[in-house]
Amino acid sequence: MPNYQQITEILKAGGVILYPTDTVWGIGCDATNLTAVARIFTIKQRSESKSLIILVSSIAMLREYIADLPQNILNYLQKINEPTTIIYENPQLLAPNVIAADNTVAIRLVQDPFCQQMITLFGKPIVSTSANISGQPTPLCFADIPATLVAQCDYVVPYRQDDTAPKKPSRLIKFDKNGELIILR
């Protein structure tokens, strides 16, 4: 069973965690902490010009970090039943290095009970990026995560490490200026 208190303390201290998500294993940190986010880019050997996904545990949390959340997106969120990341405009209160150059951010409202509990207890969104070096294949289970990457994380969540059913990344969508759904992945 995961130690939520320990995870929360590490995130509050600006640490980086390796954890199971509703999709693939992720590397995460406090999405409002510039230094912690920069460390994720370093661990992944990824350019800061590339964006990261943020996880939130509730619509209320989403509203805190997206100014003027459109009603059509709120309606859509009520209907989805698979992990879906949405590109939002007008992010606020997040670390600048998680916001794309076009002032958008990718956020997923998690449905996974572990992630919901972890994020709710932490009280802020967390970064979620696949546990691989940039440009390398996405590990589909914990055993596939490179040991060098594991060693760079401050805490590895001891939960669901034995899951062998391969997972896949979330759907990635956005809504255009007319409110039309565009599927990106």
Image (spheres, helix red, strand yellow):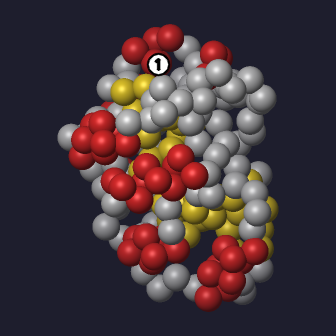
Seen at 70% across and 55% down, the residue is 83
Residue located beneath label 1 in the image: 149
Residue lying farthest to the left in this orientation: 13
Callout 1 secondary element: helix
Question: In the image, 176: left or right of 118?
Answer: right
* Residue drawn at 30 percent across, 42 percent down: 5
Residue 116 in the image: above or below residue 48 = below
Above or below for 44 versus 21: above
Locate residue 147, reporting x and y percent.
50, 11
Question: Residue visible at 36% across and 27% down?
Answer: 155
Mark 1, other Cα within 10 Å: few <14 / some 14–19 / many ≥20: some
Q: Quadrant of residue 76?
A: bottom right
Residue at the image position 43 percent from the left and 54 percent from the top: 119
What is the residue that sits farthest to the front in this orientation? 1
- Who is closer to the viewer here, 98 or 18? 18
In this rendering, would 52 be left or right of 41? Answer: right
- Return the residue found at the far top: 147
Give the quadrant of residue 109. bottom right
Kind of residue at disc 1: Leu
**Place of residue 170 in the rendered image (x, y in percent of width and height, measured from the top left):** 70, 49
Q: Is residue 110 above or below residue 46?
A: below
Q: Is residue 54 visible?
A: no
Number of numbered discs visible in the structure rendering: 1
Q: Is residue 19 left or right of residue 172?
A: left
Residue 123 seen in render: yes
